[in-house]
Amino acid sequence: MWWRLPAAEWGRGKGAANRSALRRIVASGDRPGLIAYDGDDPVGWIAIAPRETYTRLAASRTLKPLDDTPVWSITCFFVAKDYRGRGVSERLIRGAVDHARSRGARMVEGYPVVSSTGKMPDAFAWTGLPSAFERAGFREAARPSRSRRIMRKAIRAKG
């Protein structure tokens, strides 16, 4: 919900209220993201939706739109600790692209972080890492800051 709400609203709803808001989105039939499973066990999550869904992207100076192309945005990830480094992020990205394609998207964007030291604590990689996006076929479209990339993948309708 962090990306979907203005800062003050997110802060007021921190915890249970924001979880309830996400449940309402899911109950409405909208799919705010995808879950990766290992058998019956959930091991990862990726958020994806049309860019205009994300209030914080609209307000961001760093992640402002590159052009007028309608895009779907991948805004955050979670991968369970025991599954990190095993390709789950890449598979989530590929699944998110397929999800967006099935809903008419022609461009998907991600906003991974880059560490100046080459290492990054897992807690700071919640928007993904460039390498996972690259493995899923994304290319760097912009470097709005030293620590942030905008990566894009053009997609075609299945047919």
Image (cartoon, helix red, strand yellow):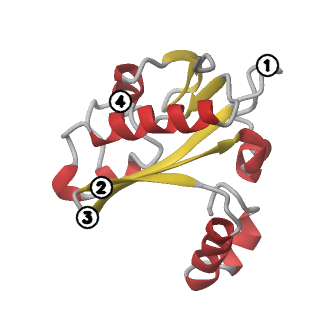
Residue indicated by mark 1: 67
Mark 2 vs mark 1, foreground winner is: 2
The numbered disc on residue 35 is none
Query: At label 3, which amino acid type do we have?
Result: Asp
Residue indicated by mark 2: 37
| Residue located at (83% from left, 21% from top) | 68
Which quadrant holds residue 151?
top right
Residue indicated by mark 3: 40
- First in sequence: mark 4 vs mark 3: 3
The answer for how far apart the CA atoms under marks 3 and 2 are is 6 Å
Mark 1 vs mark 3, foreground winner is: 3
Query: At label 1, which amino acid type do we have?
Result: Asp
Disc 4 on helix, strand or loop? Answer: helix
Residue indicated by mark 4: 132
Give the image location of residue 9, x and y in percent.
75, 72
The answer for how far apart the CA atoms under marks 2 and 1 are is 35 Å
The answer for how far apart the CA atoms under marks 1 and 3 are is 41 Å
Which quadrant holds residue 114?
top left
